[in-house]
Image (cartoon, grey):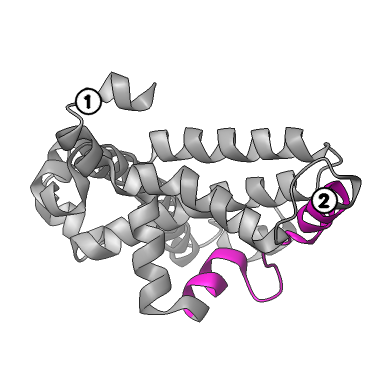
Amino acid sequence: LTHSFQKFFLPEKPGNLILLTKWLNHMVKKIKNKGAEGKILAAAKKVFTSKGMTGARMQDIADEAGINKALLHYYFRDKDKLFEVVFLEEAKKFFPKINSIFNSDVPLFGKIHNFVNEYIDEMQENPYLPWFVINEINRDPDQFMYKLWGKDNLPKPGKFLEQIGEEIKKGTIKKISPVHLLMNMISMTIFPFIGRPMFVRNLRLSDKQFND
């Protein structure tokens, strides 16, 4: 125990014992609450991924988490808020990885390979992440970028774009705007997942065929 804790909470008097009991109960409740919230977020991610935002119900998430619906609403007032928390957390984990690829010392073609693999792996694991990002960007791009990156931390593709320019000068790749190449890379890795229902239905693909 620290000196300040001893000073205020050691049970030398009955009043101090009451304070100590209340403090311990508060800490136990706080720990339990963290555990419940973690279970809810894991369950929500599983339900959202399998059923989508529209198909998921709060009751489904409560059942998956093994809690009652009232407790679920205590932590998250509605499905939209829960969806935002789940996928904002995923976005915060994913996009810094892309920054690391941009700023690595890997040659351009290795960097493109790593970029595409990272994007596809993420989209397969979290297929509704693109919908979440697009919706948030269209609603309030500045606020979303602030939530995602913070005030001063933004995507840094500068080194990657410079490498494209260098390869163009060498004649390794055809002349193209580096920004256009980056936009094409992002588009070609994301759009198949956004258009997945259309591709699966019209091309009669199984989930395995689509993912392969």
User: Which residue is more in the foreground, 199 or 106?
Assistant: 199
Residue 189's x, y, as percent?
48, 43
User: Which residue is more in the foreground, 128 or 1?
Assistant: 128
User: Which residue is more in the foreground, 187 or 66?
Assistant: 187
Q: Is residue 149 above or below residue 102?
A: below
The tag on residue 43 is none
Give the structural element (helix, strand or loop) at label 2: helix
Q: Main secondary structure of the magenta part?
A: helix
Residue 200's x, y, as percent?
21, 33
Quadrant into which the C terminus falls: top left
User: Which residue is more in the foreground, 201 or 133?
Assistant: 201
Tell whether label 2 touches label 1 (CB within 8 Å): no
> What range is drawn magenta here?
143-167
Side of 75 relative to 23 (left or right)? left
Residue type (three-letter) at the residue carrying disc 2? Ile
Side of 58 relative to 33 (left or right)? left
Give the structural element (helix, strand or loop) at label 1: loop
Residue at 73%, 61% in the rendered image? 156
Residue 57 can be seen, yes or no: no
Q: Which residue is mark 2?
A: 168
Mark 1: few/some/many CA within 10 Å (<14, 14-19, 20+): some
Side of 57 relative to 11 (left or right)? left
Mark 2: few/some/many CA within 10 Å (<14, 14-19, 20+): some
The tag on residue 205 is 1
Query: Does the stretch in magenta take in 88?
Result: no
The CA distance from mark 1 to mark 2 is 38 Å
Among numbered discs 1 and 2, the one appearing first in the sequence = 2
Residue 123's x, y, as percent?
42, 40
Residue at 56%, 74% in the rendered image? 146
Residue type (three-letter) at the residue carrying disc 1? Leu
Residue at 36%, 26% in the rendered image? 211
Q: Is residue 88 above or below residue 77?
A: above
